[in-house]
Image (spheres, helix red, strand yellow):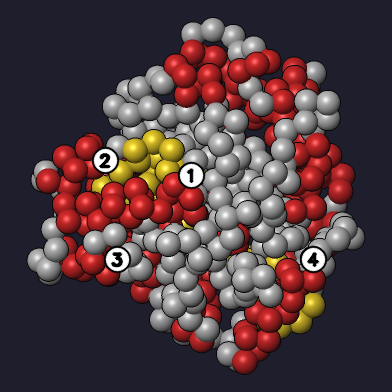
Amino acid sequence: MSSFADETRWLDATAQADLVRTGQVTPTELVEAAVERIEALDGALNAVTMRWFDHARQVAAGPLPDGPFRGVPFLLKDLWSHYEGQTLSNGNQALKDAAPVSAADTTLVGRFKAAGLVTAGRTNSPEFGSLPTTEPTAWGPTRNPWGTGHSPGGSSGGSAAAVAAGMVPIAHASDGGGSIRIPASCCGLVGLKPSQGRISLGPFRDESNLGVELCVSRTVRDTAALLDAVHGPGVGDTMIAPPPLRPYAEEVGADPGRLRIGLLDHHPFGGPVHEDCAAAARHAAGLLESLGHDVEEGYPDALRNQEFARRFSAMWSTNMGVSFARIEAQLGRPLQPGDVEPVNWVQAEFARNVSGVDYALGLAANVEFRRAVQQWWADGWDLLLTPTLGEPPTPIGAFANDPEHPMAPMVRAASYVAFTPAFNSSGQPAINLPLYWNADGLPVGIQLVAAYGREDVLLRVAAQLEAAQPWAGRRPSVG
């Protein structure tokens, strides 16, 4: 690896943009350094599955927008994020083989371009983003830079592995049940799930599927600055989060005041939680107390609502069925069992037996759940602190497809992701922070959840924790 590629490897996106802005480097130089790092490091990780290097070179050499990240190399997750003129597989073999070319950008991809980011390729995703690991049949497993026998999590695992390894400073990620926060936890990164309606999903999707999009990054300031660049409604959006009172970047370093924080360090349904994960949450609680916050055991009673989890299955499976319909439209033919991994095929088959009434009851249950969860914040709490996951990063293969038991990966996932999906249902912002590593040297993240629309509070506290216990100097073993 050249000295320049090595020197810029661990600079965050803000620092790289500053180099371009002050004329010290050109966008082309930054892109070439990122290409060099991807080629040097990705053989061990399999994070970058589509390489658009020549396209990135052309963009970098052209008239880039004068956005806050002008010239910074970037990677786009291979899930629903259409980029005009490029292919998208959603981690699916049939789409990979057909390689349909996107006719238009999504609203968010257009905003990434306007921010000046230069996209050099796509990162690996599990098929249709359905599992908390990144091991699609179509592309093979992505490995964790902190231990290549382990998963980087999912579904934004390719993006997280690429950022954690220093290929690029920041990458696109999306979250329908934890898929930003899970890989951020596994890879030692910052992962903010914005409020539902904060960032447009247009023009092809809407907020009814509970998914949101943003990024994984190494610093709080990068996440805040990118949120400033891309938030806000798109044409036709109907769920719109309240606008911030000031730029999110100004929350970094701002005094959060003295906050009342609830601690949940055990499984809300009574299932197992690995001691490393509970210890990470308790460690963060102690750090928050040392910073002047009041931390006590407490969390919304609604998180124990197992009936909602059953109702939610009707919504989740129906969304898989909708995904199938969209893929079939792209392919111009019906999907067959061999086109799709067993875990996803069986969910779509289940959806065929879900009635309109079942789906409507699921939506109603979600509304009831959302109001019950958010009431806890209305009653005077500022933040909820939990482990991000129920276990440290899992070994590769832990969520393997089993045709004899096709739902086995989803059953396995239930205990692993005990703390993240509830806040997709409630629509609240939540962030993973890398404050803890276990005895095996693997990151174990913690999650902070704020009231709906209060990304400002999350970013203030996240920056306060980053200053108190900096993580930027930690490096994974790869490379």
Q: Which residue is mark 3?
A: 6
Q: Which residue is mark 1?
A: 46
- Residues at marks 2 and 1, CA–CA distance in whole angstroms: 16 Å
- Where 254 falls versus 438 (above or below)? below
Q: Secondary structure at mark 4?
A: loop
- Residues at marks 2 and 4, CA–CA distance in whole angstroms: 41 Å
Q: Quadrant of residue 22?
A: bottom left
Q: Mark 3: which amino acid?
A: Asp
Q: Secondary structure at mark 3?
A: helix
Mark 3: give few (<14), some (14-19) or many (20+) Cα within 10 Å: some
Q: Mark 1: which amino acid?
A: Asn
Whether label 2 touches label 1, CB < 8 Å: no
Say whether disc 2 or disc 4 marks the residue closer to the N-terminus: 2
Q: Which residue is mark 2?
A: 53
Q: Secondary structure at mark 1?
A: loop
Which residue lies at the image location 13% right of the left edge and 58% below the top edge?
26
Which residue lies at the image location 62% right of the left edge and 67% below the top edge?
442
Q: Which residue is mark 4?
A: 274
Mark 1: give few (<14), some (14-19) or many (20+) Cα within 10 Å: many
- Residues at marks 4 and 1, CA–CA distance in whole angstroms: 28 Å
Which residue lies at the image location 23% right of the left edge and 37% below the top edge?
55
- Front label number (4 vs 1): 1
- Residues at marks 4 and 3, CA–CA distance in whole angstroms: 36 Å
Where residue 410 appears, as percent x and y from the top left, is 76, 39
Mark 4: give few (<14), some (14-19) or many (20+) Cα within 10 Å: some
Whether label 4 touches label 1, CB < 8 Å: no
Whether label 3 touches label 1, CB < 8 Å: no
- Residues at marks 2 and 3, CA–CA distance in whole angstroms: 19 Å
In front of the other: 405 or 449? 405
